[in-house]
Amino acid sequence: MQSPPAPEEIAQRLVALKAEHRSLDERIAKLAANPDDDLEAKRLKKRKLQLKDCIAQLESMLIPDEPA
C-alpha cells in the first residue's frame, strides 16, 4: 500500500497546478477574442475545471483531520 504524499509534495503540486490554472485563464481570455477557436476554448475550460477539482482535493489533504 502506498503512503500518502508528504505535505511538502502536496504544496509543490498545488503551486504547479495553480500556475497551470492561471496560464489557462490567460489562454482562454485570448481565445475569447476569436470565435473561430470555440472548440479549443471549450477544451481549455474543461481542463481548467479539472485543475480546479484537483486543487480543491489537494488543499483538503493539507487540512488536518479533527478528532470526533
Image: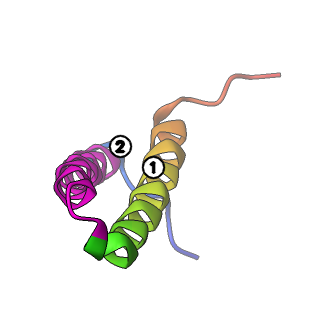
Q: Is residue 59 magenta?
A: no
Is 57 positioned to the left or the right of 33 in the image?
Answer: right
- Type of amino acid at the residue the image marks with label 2: Pro
Q: Position of residue 28 (x, y in %)?
A: 26, 56
- Left or right of 9 in this view: 1: right
Secondary element under disc 1, as helix, strand or loop, is: helix
Q: Are marks 2 and 1 in contact (CB under 8 Å)?
A: no
Q: Total label count?
A: 2
Q: Is residue 55 above or below residue 34?
A: above
Q: How packed is label 2: few (under 14 Cα within 10 Å), some, or many (20 or more)?
A: some
Q: Position of residue 37 (x, y in %)?
A: 28, 74
Q: Secondary structure at mark 2?
A: helix
Quadrant of the rendered image containing residue 68: top right
The local crowd at label 1, few if under 14, some if 14 to 19, many if 20 or more residues have their Cα within 10 Å, is: some
Q: Main secondary structure of the magenta part?
A: helix
> Which quadrant of the rendered structure holds the N terminus?
bottom right
Res. 23 mark: none
As displayed, is residue 21 above or below residue 45?
A: above
Task: Decide if residue 13 is on the left or right side of residue 19.
Answer: right
Query: What mark, if any, has residue 7 been given in the picture?
Result: 2
Closer to the chain start, of discs 2 and 1, is 2
Q: Residue at x 50, y 64 (%)?
A: 3
Q: What is the three-letter code of the residue carrying label 1?
A: Lys
Cα distance between the residues tagged 2 and 1? 19 Å
Query: x and y percent of residue 66 in the render?
Result: 69, 23
Q: Which mark is residue 52?
A: 1
Question: Which stretch is magenta?
Answer: 9-35
